[in-house]
Amino acid sequence: MSVIDKAKKILSGVMHPEHGKSIEELGMADLQLRSENLLEVRITGKKFPDAFLKSIGRIAGQKLKEGLAPDGITTEVTIEDAPRPASRPAVPESLKHVKNIIAVASGKGGVGKSTISVNLAVGLAQTGAKVALVDADIYGPSMPIMLGVKDHKPGAKPFGDRTMIEPVERFGVKMLSVGFFVDPEKALIWRGPMASNALIQIISDGYWGEIDYMVIDLPPGTGDIHLTLVQTLPVTGAVMVSTPQDIAIADARKGIALFSQEKINVPIIGLVENMAWFSPPELPGNRYYIFGRGGCDKLAAETDTEVIGRIPIVESACNASDNGTPVVTDKNHPLSEPFRKMVERVRIKLDERNQNLGPTQVVEVTRQ
Ligand SMILES: Nc1ncnc2c1ncn2[C@@H]1O[C@H](COP(=O)(O)OP(=O)(O)O)[C@@H](O)[C@H]1O
Ligand SMILES: [Mg+2]
């Protein structure tokens, strides 16, 4: 029997009191024969901290000495702590199988953030991807109406010893909305932390399963909820929505600045210019730039991002939202093509991002 095999046999008799298995079985010992008669043994703790590491090291040293000295082998045992776990909060268990989390944000309200979110989610599902949609706009949830499930009551789903919330499925998208749980009028008087807690509970209690893309429709602005979100979820990237209007651009710039902060560092997937122009149905070739022109391009150049979609104003977009059928579901709708192009850009940009950067870490943000 080789020296290494002999040493392994000896170590399989050294038990870890907490785990009830030998340190050999637990894979805690690394053995190296340094010369014909010197065996180096490095024992690493099973977890950090491992209260038994020292005594295990002592016992192992003793037994190896007794067992190998008759063969003229000297053993040198060193012990080493297991790596200290990262101090950042753990990703909620229910999101472990969610590959990409896309936060849809805007500086200003009413720019079409929810319209973009729902068409992005349904458009991604049309490509065959598994998609989730979270309506996180606690003060103005709109997904129940936009997906035609206004009166839906989400069911409870037992999962191990927990009860999860079952998302509602529409157009191949699994959706949960804060609107299912809170009355927006009541939410208005909530303090920031209450709103963020409700939101996080909904996301982490959702029974999502395997998901390729989770789209989150955020509230407008750059507040507490946005910070809490990046503290709790590993957001892959943010899509910023703006109209070409100066005031909307100024607010979108603040949004980009929030996600790009050194400590947050959520990449901006791109900028979607909504209400980019208006073409009257009777003169579809004419474009009227009623909110101005070029603002989004300027912002993209300034912040080193890309305009990944331009969506014109079409009157019937409002009806589609109100009656629960997102425009991407209707191939003949004039906005279906611009939305499909946007979906394609998002997919490409996310692939590029995932090839070039590691996963976004949940950050620790210190509040002042
Ligand atoms: N491209 C568009 N053309 C016409 N109406 C639009 C367009 N985008 C959004 N709207 C309408 O504008 C209103 C605000 O859009 P919404 O998506 O709810 O914005 P937000 O979520 O940013 O508040 C809605 O009535 C919506 O139907
Ligand atoms: Mg909205």
Image (spheres, rainbow, N blue to C red):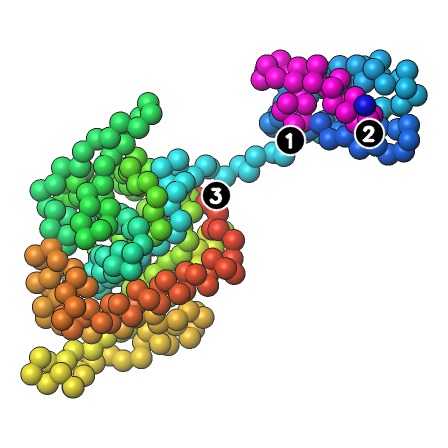
Ligand 2 has an atom within 8 Å of the beta carbon of the residue at disc 1: no
Q: Amino acid at mark 2?
A: Glu
Name the residue at 14% across, 80% down.
Answer: 279
Label 2 sits on residue:
40
Q: Residue furthest front?
A: 1
Q: Distance between the Cα atoms at labels 2 and 1?
A: 18 Å
Q: Nearer the viewer, mark 2 or mark 1?
A: 2
- Please tell me which residue lies in front, 95 or 250: 95
Locate residue 264 relative to residue 202 in the image: left or right: right
- The image quadrant of residue 41 is top right
Q: Looking at the image, tell me whether mark 3 or mark 1 is earlier in sequence order.
A: 1
Q: Looking at the image, tell me whether mark 2 or mark 3 is earlier in sequence order.
A: 2
Ligand 2 has an atom within 8 Å of the beta carbon of the residue at disc 3: no
Q: Nearer the viewer, mark 2 or mark 3?
A: 2
Is residue 20 found inside the magenta-colored segment of the image? Answer: yes
Is residue 88 found inside the magenta-colored segment of the image? Answer: no
- The image quadrant of residue 18 is top right
- Please tell me which residue lies in front, 181 or 339: 339
Label 3 sits on residue:
364
> x, y percentage for residue 356?
52, 61
Quadrant of the image containing the N terminus: top right
Ligand 2 has an atom within 8 Å of the beta carbon of the residue at disc 2: no
Q: Distance between the Cα atoms at labels 2 and 3?
A: 40 Å
Query: Element at badge 1?
Result: loop
Q: Are marks 2 and 1 in contact (CB under 8 Å)?
A: no
Residue 137 visible to an observer of this rendering: no
Locate residue 12 relative to residue 315 in the image: left or right: right
Name the residue at 85% across, 24% down.
Answer: 75
